[in-house]
Image: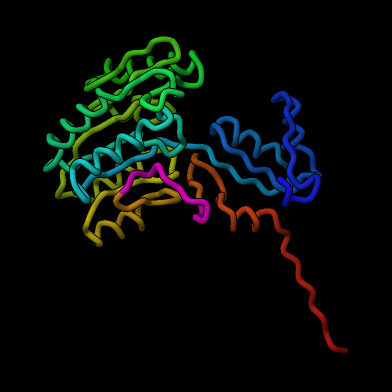
Amino acid sequence: APLLPEGAFSILPCTRDAADLLTTDERFKLLTFTGSPSVGWKMKSRAGKKKVVLELGGNAACVVDELVPNLEAVVSQVIHGAFYQSGQSCISVQRLFVNDSIYDVFRSALVEQVSALKAGDPSDPEVFIGPVISEKDAQRMADWIEEAVSEGGKVLCGGKRDGVMVEATIIENVPHMCKAFSEEVFGPVLCIEKYNGSDFRSIIDLVNDSDFGLQAGVFTNNFNKAFYAFENIEVGGVVINDVPSIRVDSQPYGGVKSAGLGREGIRYAIEDMTEMRVMLMKNA
C-alpha cells in the first residue's frame, strides 16, 4: 500500500513450525490470531509476556421470537446467516430457536428455500453452496450429521456429502450433546427447534448453554426482550432483528468463553498496538 511506510506491513509465507516464532519471539509485542480454539489457546500459552487477541469461532445461536419485519425477510436472513460461504464463518448461524407460535410456517418456508439453493462451482454467480475447505472436514460434517440423526434428530433437507461438497442441511430437534449442536460445525449445517414462546428467559438460558460466545441474533419487536437478551446472553455481541452473521469494522468484535479473547476493530487494534505511557513533572 503506497500510504504505508516501508516495512510497516509484511506478509511472510512460511510453514506452521516456522510461524511459531511469531508466537514465541519476545520482539513481537502483540499476537493476534483468528482460527480454531485448539490452536489459539495453545498459542496463547506460548506467547510469553506479549498481549494476545484471539478470535476463535463458535456455534452461533439465533432466536426467532417474532417475524420482524415479516416471514420472507427473516427466512432470507437466516438462510444467508447459516449458509453463506457454505457455513464456513465463525459467526454462521448453527443453532436456530423459533417461537412455537410461528414454528410450522417458518420451518416450511425455510426448508423449501434451502432445498432450492444451487450448489456447485462458487465462481458461478448463481451458485450459493460451494465446497468446504477439505475432504477431511466434509467427512467430519457428514459424521456429525449421522450422529445427530442416530440420536434422534430429523434431517429436513440435505444431509449428504459428495467429496468436498456438503449439501445445505437442516436438522430438527438435534439432541444437545451431539457435535452438530454443541461444537463448531464450520459448514452448511443448521440445527432447528421450537421453544415455548411464553418462556423467553428459558430460551436465553439455552443460547448460553455453549462453550462458545461470539455473537447471537434475536428477532423481536419487544424492547424488554431485546434488552433482556443483550444483558443476559453470554456473547461479545447481540444483533437485534438480524442474524449474528454480520459485523462492521468500527464495532468491538470478539467473543467470550472458548470463542476468544480481546476485541478486533480499528479502534481496538490501535489500542492493542499502543503502549500507554505517562510523564509526571513536578515544578520544583
Say which residue appears at 27% left-offset and 44% top-offset.
Answer: 63
**Image quarter of the N terminus:** top right
Give the mark count: 0
Q: Position of residue 230 (x, y in %)?
A: 35, 56
Numbered range of the magenta stretch: 242-252
Tell me the chief SS of the magenta region.
loop
* Residue sitting farthest toward the top: 162
Q: Position of residue 64 (x, y in %)?
A: 24, 44
Taking depth in this image into account, of 108 and 224 the one nearest to the observer is 108
Query: Is residue 31 in the magenta section?
Result: no
Say which residue appears at 49% left-offset and 41% top-offset.
Answer: 259
Q: Position of residue 96 (x, y in %)?
A: 28, 37
Q: Is residue 53 left or right of residue 206?
A: right
Q: Give the answer, above or below, for where 240 lies relative to 179.
A: below
* Residue sitting farthest toward the right: 284
Q: How is the image coloured?
A: rainbow
* Residue sitting farthest toward the bottom: 284
**Image quarter of the C terminus:** bottom right
Q: Is residue 199 left or right of residue 51?
A: left
In the figure, residue 266 lies in which quadrant? bottom right
Q: Is residue 112 left or right of residue 35?
A: left
Say which residue appears at 73% left-offset and 28% top-offset.
Answer: 13
Q: Position of residue 253 (x, y in %)?
A: 50, 50
Query: Is residue 248 in the magenta section?
Result: yes
In the figure, residue 16 lies in which quadrant? top right
Q: Give the answer, above or below, for where 164 lies relative to 259.
A: above
In the figure, residue 122 lies in which quadrant? top left
Q: Give the answer, above or below, for where 31 lies relative to 136.
A: below
Say which residue appears at 43% left-offset and 38% top-offset.
Answer: 211
